[in-house]
Structure formats: structure tokens, C-alpha cells
Image (cartoon, rainbow, N blue to C red):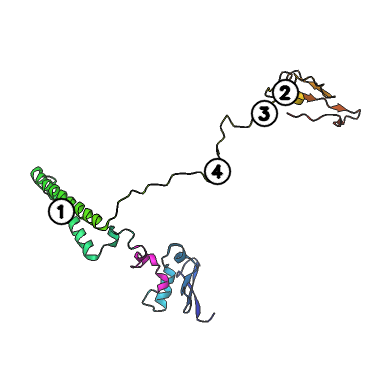
Amino acid sequence: MSGCCIYKVAKYCGNGDAWYVTHSEYAVEKLKCSCLRMESIGLPCDHIVCVLVFLDIDEIPKCLVLLRWAKNAKESIIGSYPGGSLYWGSQVAGRYSSLVKMSKDVAELVYDDLDDYNRVVDVLDGELKRLKAKQQKDQTNVATGSGTMDVNVLDPPQVRTKGCGSNPTPTPGNRRCGPTCGDCGIFGHNKRFCPNSNNDVPLGVTPSQNLENAGVYVDVVNTHEGGELDTSSCPAVDL
């Protein structure tokens, strides 16, 4: 490939392990390493840095700096949270940090003295009430001027999907049971083997002593003289 060089990077007096760094002047990804650290976590590996030093490149190429590490990484979501601290300017962030530091210093100085503690708490409580009332008044004026109405948006109602069915979880009432006789309506047999029926029992079928009450019949299997089973005359048992 024209304009492409492959560099072998290995540790001096090492165990023989080596990594290969590809440098291309015309490709979008100018530098790639066989360790794939850049592709996995988004940070250039030591092998690429060694090649940059070897080539006397004093500036990190743009292909080695992902968008999430750049200073403009949050531009795509600016405005989504207008009140968040992520979108403050440098002056606003500086004032906030100054207030936080001052509050910590005051807390460390007055927490051990009850009189100073009560005085500082009274001052802060009064300022807190004043600032909350001022902020609430400003928000009311803005809402009145814009003519908007605050509405709480709740979660949508849950509905069944088309493939869910009326009752996806079977209950004991609608689970499939065994056979039921069509003549007497007793569970456990069908009308063909109903003991209360006047129909004759099929030839070759005798009632079992243990299953007589359930109305189930067992086939009598005939055998030939050779010991082979003859099932041609055995009717099928429908349980």
C-alpha cells in the first residue's frame, strides 16, 4: 500500500513479544496497533506513542482523540438540561466553587462553638428563605408572561400487546384436563370405554381389575407359538 508503513514495537531484552503499528498518511485512521487498545477503550496505547516519538510527531493526531474526550463533546446535548451545572459558563462555575469553598471554611470554624453556630444558622436560614421567595416569584412572573401551564406528565397506561393473549398465565380453572365421557359425563374415560354404556366391549379387550372403576381397558396381546407378539387383532386404547 502506498504511503503505509508498519512498525514493529518490542521491549528491549524482552521475551520476544512484539506489536505492529500501522502508519498511513492518507487513511482516516492514520495509526492502528495490533493490541487494539484504541478500538476497545478509546485511548492510544504505548506502542503508538513510541511510533509517534520515533517519527518526531509533536502533536497527537485527531484520529487518536475521540469526541468524548474533546472539549466540545457536550455540544450535541446543550439545551437538554438548561439548569444543570454542565452548561455553566466559566464565571458562573467560578462563583459556585467560591461559595462552596467559603461554606466549607465557615462550617469548619463554627461547628465547635454553639453561639457562633446558632448565629450562622440564623443568618443562613434568613438568606435561604429570602432567596427561595425571590426565585419563586421570578418563576411565577415568567410563567404568567409566557402563558404556559405546568402539567405533570405521567407514565402511559400499560396495555397488552397483540401477541400476549387474554390470559397468558394458565390458571387451575382453564388448564387442560384428561378425557371426559360424552355419555355419563364422568372424568377419566371416554364414551367408547364407558362402563355405564350398553355397547358391547370390543373383541380382544377385557377390563382390568385395578382400572375397572376408572373405565379404562387394557389390551390382551396374543402370542404365536414362536414367541412373537401379534398385535393385529388388538384395538387401540384411547386414554
Could you tell which of marks 1 and 2 lies nearer the N-terminus?
Answer: 1
Q: CA distance from mark 4 to mark 2?
A: 37 Å
Q: Is residue 81 visible?
A: yes
Q: Residues within 10 Å of mark 1 (few under 14, many from 20)?
A: few
Q: CA distance from mark 3 to mark 4?
A: 26 Å
State which mark lies toward you, 1 or 2: 2
Return the residue found at the far bottom.
2
Residue range (magenta):
61-77
In the displayed structure image, the side of residue 116 where residue 101 appears, left or right:
right
Q: Are marks 1 and 4 in contact (CB under 8 Å)?
A: no
Q: Which residue is mark 3?
A: 178
Q: Earlier in the sequence, mark 3 or mark 2?
A: 3
Q: Nearer the viewer, mark 1 or mark 4?
A: 4
Could you tell me if the residues under marks 3 and 1 are in contact, i.e. CB atoms within 8 Å?
no
> Which of the two residues, 110 or 119, is positioned nearer the viewer here?
119
Tell me the crowding category of disc 2: few under 14, some 14 to 19, or many 20 or more residues within 10 angstroms, Cα based: few
Element type at mark 2: loop
